[in-house]
Amino acid sequence: MKRTGMKRSLLTALAAAVFLLCGTMPAIAAINGITGTTFNLTAKSGYISTAEGGSYLAWGYANGNGLMQFPGPTLIVNQGAVVTVNLTNALAVPVSIVFPGQTGVIASGGSQGMLTREAAAAGGTVSYTFTASRPGTYTYYSGTQPDVQVEMGLAGALIVRPGTPGQAYDHADSAFDHEYLFFLSDMDPNIHDAVAAGNLTPDTTSHFAVYWLINGRTAPDTMAAAGAAWLPHQPYNIMPMMHPGERILIRMIGAGRDAHPFHTHGNHHRIIARDGRMLSSAPANGADLGEQAFTTSAVPGSTVDAIYTWTGDKMGWDFYGHAGPGGETGQACVDAGVALAAGESLADHCKPFPVTLPSQETLTFGQFYSGSPFLGAMGTLPPGEGGFNPNGGFLFMWHSHNEKEIVNFDIFPGGLLTMLLIEHPSVPLMNP
Amino acid sequence: MTTFYWKTRIKSAFLALVLFLGLCGTSQAAEYWLRAETIAKNMPDGAAITMWGLASCTDGTYATCAPATVPGPELNVPVGDTSLTVHLRNNLTGPYTEPISLLIPGQQTSLSPVMQDTDTSGRLRVTSFVAETPVDNTSSTDYVWNNVKAGTYLYQSGTHPALQVQMGLYGAMTHDAAANQAYGASTAFATSAIVLFSEIDPLLHISIAAGDYGPGMGMTSTMHYEPKYFLINGTAFSTASPITVAAGTAGSTTLLRFLNAGLRMRVPTLSGLYLSLVAEDGNLYPFAKEQYSVLLAPGKTMDALITPANYGAYAIFDRMLGLANYLQPGGGMLAYLSVGAGGPEKVGVFRGGYWYRDANGNNIWDGGIDTTTRFGITGDIPVPGDWNGDGVDDMGVYRNTYFYRDTNGNGIWDAGIDSTTKFGVFGDTPVVGDWNSDGISEIGVFQNGTWYIDFNGNGAWNNGADKTFTFGAAGNIPVVGDWNGDGSTNIGVFIPATGAWNLDLNGNGAFDGCVIDGCYTFGQAGDVPVTADWNGDGTTNIGVFRGAGFWHTDSNGNGVLDTGVDVTFKFGIANDKPVVGRW
């Protein structure tokens, strides 16, 4: 009982913090990251936190003289830009960066390593220059002993924007209203502990992950605010939000050592690109070779772009609570003068909620439950229940479909998990 | 009905004709004689792993066989052949051996499972998918595939595969639909290369070598599999001996055949290039997929085309991070695709500090078109090389133990910018080559039969990191080139008194006799040896510069001067120093 109480107050505090931070922070870009053409990164160490209370040594790329962060800064550049990444190494081992999917990368300085030129330990520098010739979602990571250094956290995302705003690629099939990064990784604490104990060449062949992360965080930290003060080395959050009918661009990166089957509740998503290339039969044909899926793996080192939308289709009731004057549904209800609302599916228009809600004393409540089956509406809740969903939104869990990956070192729930929040069109989104 | 009847008749007549043509035509069978042997494979960390390899033999006597390897030899069914026959012999040795067999998933043949091992209920258990070859080194079993399908396939043992595939009984089987076309015109290629991934869990191999495998023994099954070594084409990467895969030349298309003989997923990831994925499991895709990496499941094959614009070494590695050699990080499944410069090398001469170079490659001096450039002084030894990896050879000279190199490639000496490096001692002969196949030329010297090679390319001698070879003798003239087309420069010597050449064809830095390495006679006393890729095939061939500026080149690459066939021309004058490169 005591533990439950503790947990609840922690969660309440967390929720309060979320709202506080969101209230005080300026509007943030759709995907947190740094923009420009020249980036100065520093490889350094720090500690990352897991939601059940763990703390592990990690290596990561910091923005300039900032704190080490995992993932490294998301580099957001425009197509055609000549990008320079200057890397300074504050670690005790040589490091480097490779940019899979970029052609013509020129490395200068440092010394030649296995995959590219490397910055020497303790202060060495190296520079990489390339032209971001094609738009898309990419990743970058260390090309030096990657079996150790990728595990330790030296990895990040690279986004190349096309000339047309609001699209991921040069085709309308990639148009989106909101975009979110899903940088999916895994962690074997034994390797981190070995490095922390001074073994810089740990055995990576017996890798066995017990943590799974999105954008560097385990659930429920995934849903805490970006830049949360208590996660100084994990600045990126992930809690996708949308209004009905809008399109979310999922930019997914396989950033760990294993593939993670990412599952979207609420609807299927349409895969439109892999490895920064649209799934096209010919360049002008958009994502005509795209495919629907409700579970998609970005295999390690690769990227997937997918479009997700939600209209309430096939829910079986009108989530806005519309009613036809004579009980009409669908087109007949529109003809009877009840217009479709934003993002609503025609098939379920004006369909009444099909069941009578059970009385409250027979229910248990989740903190996200609004008390009402209608979007944007609040129902009656017993004292102390609910509270995480003040606008009456709908929530769908997005998570690894490898169910053992939604734990934090065997403690459920956690891991590679977040919630999609669908808000009423009148509600501004906190994660735009 | 009438129509149907006629159709049937026509069909029968047609079939008869086809059969007739088939019988008297050129349809042939590819035939291989393989022998399984127990071998030791050395890992970069020093471990010697007992493996079961396959040796390719010349005929049914099994008297002449190449050394057994893991993976086994490529089984290629040439274009035009329709069937494949493998005669398999089993010479496995050691305290634990098993009958073996061969299976090619994706190629149809009639299987004849071997059932044995009755359980307590009297039921039989399959122990082999196909007929077995017993461990007798005497008999042989024939495995036959008719109507061979085009594509890339993995062959492996069909007997106790959980154990025997791990032990090394696997390899690539290939068959092209047409000459230089994997599946048809959409998969045309100039070069093809095999990139085969596999793994080693040393515990099994130790148990087999010790006869400690089986019921009641130290190791009872292969259940607890945890690979520690990660191989491409049978080799685990180390910086001391990097893996290179010859992958054609710049501007031309290379077919990469990916195979996974391991038991874990792999993700081959290519640096600096995209793959055009065209086929999977020997099946052509309706649309190619453009990716820089590909998920390669165990037992799977994938075909991809690349057409690199620039030459160089492109790293390919496993992003599932099979990138360690057991306890040593930074090894495993990493190889360099070596893409050669397109086209033949061009000639030039060095005379009194001036370089006269045949820019248009017609082997004739064209004043006003070809280039004259001052770099160096009278008495310098010209040492051209691609110092910056841009695919173009730059100038350089060796003078009094110093290399002066035009590292920024602008054709003039820029003090403080271009490189000055001391390497060697007085009397050494300078040599230049891409020793480590990174696409950038490195330096070296030859000193009375001993070679000192700047393998790590830092311009200085580093004991351990750099390499030294003994090849040739005092008085020999060192020659270098990529004799075997693997992307790294190999060594050799020219004996000026006789015109004899000894070339390190296998690239091990030692002379292994004329059967393994190459011995030729080309030229005569007083000739100056010149080596270049005369015909643009990606391998270096030999030649000589003689008298008043005559070049005699082995342009057909057979090691013999064929009058009227090999190209001979005049470029330069007496006492010029010949140079070759891609200008």
Image (spheres, coloured by chain):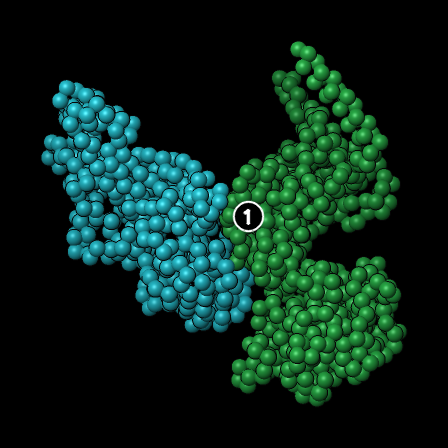
Q: Is residue A68 left or right of residue B8?
A: left
Question: Residue B82 at what x, y percent from top left?
Answer: 75, 35
Quadrant, the N terminus of chain A: top left
Furthest-bottom residue in this view: B378
Chain containing mark 1: B
Visible in this render: residue B228? yes
The one of B322 and B120 positioned closer to us in this rendering: B322
Q: Is residue B103 above or below residue B345?
A: above
Instruction: Residue at 32%, 53% (x, y): give it.
Output: A165
Instruction: Residue at 24%, 55% (x, y): give it.
Output: A28
The one of A58 and B407 positioned closer to us in this rendering: B407
Q: Is residue B113 above or below residue B77?
A: above
Q: Is residue B524 left or right of residue A248?
A: right
Helix, strand or loop under label 1: strand
Chain that the image shows in green: B
Q: Is residue A352 above or below residue B540?
A: above
Look at the image and give the colour of chain A.
cyan
Q: Which residue is mark 1?
A: B276
Amino acid type, label 1: Ser
The one of B133 and A101 positioned closer to us in this rendering: A101
Q: Is residue B130 left or right of residue A279?
A: right
Disc 1 crowd rating (10 Å Cα; few below 14, some 14-19, many 20+) is many
